[in-house]
Amino acid sequence: MGKIAIIMGSKSDFGVVKPALNVIKSFGVECEVHVISAHRTPEEAHNYSLTAKERGIEVIICAAGKAAHLGGVIAANTVLPVIGLPVKTDMMGGLDSLLSIVQMPSGIPVATVGVNGGENAGLLALQILGIKYPDIAAKLADYKAKMRDKINSDDVALQSELED
């Protein structure tokens, strides 16, 4: 049923990654998680991206802060979809990370979610897999229906309060 990889540039990024891992696991999709740095372990990053597909990985999420080159380094060496997850920083609040990820050179696409947007990174990875796996697509439809139902319920409750 597909397999997703999550890579983070530093173990300290795990708090940002955890919502992605949680949503992926809640859908019953296998996920592997690693700490690999584009700058401090470039050979490992290179080897990981070259071997991901043969290990059954179908989508890779890369969480990184500051210079945030991890997603681009991975995307340069694979044809798999790569999702960049920018990590909030003290210096620029994550804007530095976001801009580093979205400014990939032509030919090296990295999809990008918002700063610290772990849940959306996981959901985007699941939507990509949902193209191939109907059971994931059905679970995503249920997930969105529950969100819709909650908002509609919240609106009904608000309207009731406003009438009083």
Image (cartoon, rainbow, N blue to C red):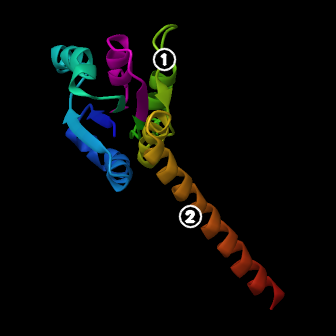
How far across and how far down the image is residue 156, in percent? 73, 78
Q: 10 Å neighbourhood of mark 2: few (<14), some, or many (≥20)?
A: few
| Eye-nearest disc, 2 or 1 | 2
Amino acid on which the number 2 mark rests in the picture? Lys
Residue under the point 43% across and 30% down: 83
Q: Position of residue 45 (x, y in %)?
A: 22, 19
In the image, residue 138 lies in the stretch drawn in magenta: no
Q: Nearer the viewer, residue 45 or 98?
A: 45
Count of all numbered marks drawn on residues in the image: 2
The vertical placement of 108 against 113, above or below, is: above
* Residue 125 relative to residue 161: left or right: left
* Residue 82 sits above or below residue 121 on the image: above
- Identify the residue at horizontal 42%, vertical 30% (top origin): 84
Q: Dot 1: what SS? A: loop
Q: Residue at x 33, y 16 (%)?
A: 73
**Residue 112 percent across, percent down from the top left:** 49, 31
Q: Is residue 57 above or below residue 116?
A: above
Disc 2 element: helix
Quarter where residue 151 is shown: bottom right
From the image, tell me which residue sits under label 2.
146
The answer to whether the residues at label 2 and label 1 have Cβ atoms under 8 Å apart is no
Q: Is residue 84 magenta?
A: yes
Identity of the residue drawn at 21% across and 18% down: 51
Residue 26 falls left or right of residue 107: left
98 or 90: nearer the eye?
A: 98
> How far is disc 2 from disc 1 in space, using C-alphas?
32 Å
Quarter the N terminus occupies: top left
Q: Which mark is residue 11?
A: none
Q: Which residues are drawn in magenta?
A: 64-85
> Residue at label 1?
109
